[in-house]
């Protein structure tokens, strides 16, 4: 094919895209009657067209059956609702179905996981996180440390990029873990860092954490549905994610957790329990004495938020059809295309791509550091129908999502940006 810097090249790439039909499964927002260039699937994924049907089915069940919907709702009895997402989620995160369950919201689940897997002792009490972690994660970790009456600044270990660099080197993470090996209780990093888009080396980090005698968990908010994951194989202890970013399950959508089977079948692990984690057969006997279900299910607390979970199932159905492998394949091409176009602007020192150029170390997002007039450039993009996101002090994050973004989106974005940035 010809010159990459042309609309014709982008359109031809779209024609050759085996996943191109999936865009039509989503509602695409418009500005002045024209579909926007939606590059914020990393913040709130678009609405699948089948979401409404799934939710309406549950509303109908509720309207016609009332409480009987728990067992007799036509398609998906509510009592078992958390089970319907297992197969799809297990594929997406590389887990056994019994190791995953959808429940609660993300920050709540980080707390639930830390209650079980951050169990500090007088000698082993530190948590390692990345400096500049998403604020909610920072607050969760801070409050967990304080909950255990530990000195916050001593118990919190943060790892920052080297001077003059934007992302973390795996060998530096490993070194940091080794430095604290006698006192480290937990390593809890992102899978994909929200600000830089860096995809961490989960396997190596998990091995290093275990070698140091710590447990290792990941916040997969920006990784789930974006990059290939092998949580079971890589022996990750636990993980949590949200479903409203790449998983397109709607604002505030239900979160999910992974608990490795080496922990999942151990009823003696302390947890904050509720009736939905209790042995399913006996749940309605309303008796004393908590007996956790096996697997991740034993961490459930409350009965399922059915309306939110219906939206989740609708979106997962689409994921299942497309398949993570095919999505990743397209994602590498789409983001690679964006990168190749932006290189031209980078060579002119108009911006800097701070996301790693190594494709094994990133998902679909590129974070663009714009040194001068960043905010004004961002506002121009917005007026021109680009939905991207601005992070203080000077970063524009753009995430071409393989399920619904096109090569034409990427070209048009570059074209708009080029005209305003030069
Ligand atoms: C999006 C995101 C959150 C959001 O947390 P909620 O509890 O769903 O509001 C938390 N952590 C990270 C890393 C995120 O990217």
Image: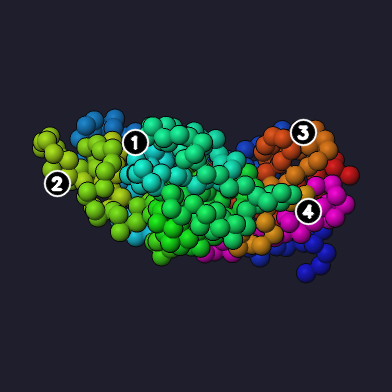
**x then y, percent, for residue 318:** 47, 53
Q: Is residue 18 left or right of residue 259?
A: right
Element on which disc 1 rests: loop
Quote the CA–CA distance across marks 3 and 1: 39 Å
Nearer to us of marks 1 and 4 is 4
User: Mark 3 near mark 2, Cβ–Cβ under 8 Å?
Assistant: no
Q: Earlier in the sequence, mark 2 or mark 4?
A: 2
Residue drawn 31% across and 50% down? 296
- Disc number placed over residue 342 in the picture, else none: 4
Element on which disc 4 rests: helix
Quadrant position of the N terminus in the picture:
bottom right
User: Mark 2 near mark 4, Cβ–Cβ under 8 Å?
Assistant: no
Q: Is residue 9 something one can see in this rendering?
A: yes
Element on which disc 2 rests: helix
Residue bearing the label numbered 3: 375
**x then y, percent, for residue 121:** 35, 44
**x then y, percent, for residue 14:** 68, 59
Q: Is residue 339 magenta?
A: yes
Please give the range of residues in magenta. Answer: 322-351
Nearer to us of marks 3 and 1 is 3
Quote the CA–CA distance across marks 1 and 2: 20 Å
Q: Earlier in the sequence, mark 1 or mark 4?
A: 1
- Disc number placed over residue 281 in the picture, else none: 2
Q: Earlier in the sequence, mark 1 or mark 2?
A: 2
Residue drawn 62% across and 57% down? 169
Element on which disc 3 rests: helix
């Amino acid at each position: 094919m010809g010159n990459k810097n042309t609309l014709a090249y982008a359109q031809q790439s779209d024609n050759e895209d085996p996943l191109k039909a999936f865009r039509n499964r989503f509602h695409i927002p418009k500005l002045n009657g024209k579909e926007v260039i939606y590059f914020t699937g990393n913040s709130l994924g678009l609405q699948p067209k089948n979401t409404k049907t799934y939710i309406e089915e549950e509303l109908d069940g509720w309207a016609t059956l009332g409480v009987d919907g728990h067992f007799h709702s036509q398609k998906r009895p509510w009592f078992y609702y958390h089970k319907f997402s297992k197969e799809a989620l297990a594929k997406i995160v590389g887990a056994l179905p019994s190791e995953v369950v959808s429940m609660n919201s993300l920050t709540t689940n980080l707390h639930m996981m830390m209650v079980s897997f951050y169990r500090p002792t007088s000698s082993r009490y530190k948590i390692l996180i990345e400096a500049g972690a998403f604020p909610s994660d920072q607050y969760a970790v801070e409050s967990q440390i304080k909950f255990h009456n530990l000195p916050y600044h001593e118990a919190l270990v943060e790892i920052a990029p080297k001077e003059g660099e934007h992302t973390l080197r795996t060998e530096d993470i490993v070194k940091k873990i080794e430095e604290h090996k006698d006192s480290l209780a937990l390593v809890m990093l992102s899978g994909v860092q929200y600000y830089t888009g860096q995809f961490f080396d989960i396997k190596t980090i998990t091995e290093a954490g275990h070698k140091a005698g710590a447990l290792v968990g990941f916040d997969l908010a920006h990784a789930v549905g974006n990059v290939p994951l092998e949580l079971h194989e890589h022996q990750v202890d636990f993980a949590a994610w949200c479903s409203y970013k790449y998983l397109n399950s709607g604002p505030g959508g239900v979160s999910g957790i992974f608990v490795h089977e080496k922990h999942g079948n151990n009823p003696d692990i302390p947890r904050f329990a509720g009736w939905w984690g209790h042995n399913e057969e006996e749940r309605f006997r309303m008796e004393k004495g908590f007996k956790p279900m096996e697997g991740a299910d034993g961490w459930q607390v409350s009965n399922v938020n059915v309306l939110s979970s219906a939206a989740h199932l609708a979106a997962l159905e689409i994921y299942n059809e497309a398949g993570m492998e095919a999505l990743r394949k397209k994602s590498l091409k789409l983001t690679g295309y964006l990168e190749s176009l932006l290189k031209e602007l980078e060579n002119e020192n108009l911006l800097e791509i701070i996301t790693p150029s190594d494709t094994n170390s990133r998902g679909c997002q590129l974070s663009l550091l714009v040194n001068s007039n960043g905010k004004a450039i961002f506002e121009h993009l917005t007026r021109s129908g680009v939905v991207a996101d601005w992070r203080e002090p000077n970063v524009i994050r753009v995430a071409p999502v393989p399920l619904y973004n096109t090569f034409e989106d990427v070209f048009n974005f570059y074209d708009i940006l080029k005209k305003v940035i030069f």
